[in-house]
Amino acid sequence: MVRSGPGANEWPEEELPLLTASILQVVFGHFALAGLLRETSGTDPLAPGALRRQTRFLLDYFEHLFPQPNPGSAGERPTGG
């Protein structure tokens, strides 16, 4: 996905390892930090509803990281926000 997914060409080759690491941190971080999230939010981050919200968030996250290329946008970087 990092090398061949939609919008992958928006990322410089030397940043692909950092991008891969950030994806892993976001995906696994939710589970690794479940205890802290539970303690600070007062909700169970592993409950079915919370996992559905996290899944929707990850889908949006990936759409922002790997936007569909637009004609004429070659060389533009993804924008945060």
Image (cartoon, grey):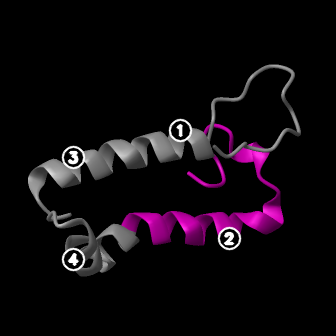
Residue under numbered circle 2: 18
Q: Residues within 10 Å of mark 2 (few under 14, many from 20)?
A: few
The answer to whether the residue labelled 1 contacts the one labelled 2, judged by CB atoms less than 8 Å apart, is no
Which residue has dot 3 on it?
52
Per the image, label 1 sits on a secondary structure element best described as helix
Does the residue at mark 3 contact the one at mark 1 (Cβ under 8 Å)?
Answer: no
Q: What secondary structure is found at the residue carrying circle 3?
A: helix
* Amino acid type assigned to the residue bearing label 2 in the image: Leu
**Disc 3 residue type?**
Arg
Q: Is disc 4 in contact with disc 1, using a CB cutoff of under 8 Å?
A: no
Is residue 56 highlighted in magenta? no
Residue 63: which numbered mark, if any? 1
The Cα–Cα distance between marks 2 and 3, rounded to whole angstroms, is: 27 Å
Of marks 3 and 1, which one's residue comes earlier in the chain?
A: 3
**Residue occupying the point 74% across, 23% down:** 70
Q: Which amino acid, by three-letter code, is at mark 4?
A: Glu
Q: Earlier in the sequence, mark 4 or mark 2?
A: 2
The picture places residue 37, in percent across and down from the top left corner, at 28, 71
The magenta segment: 1-27
Report the residue marked by disc 4.
Answer: 39
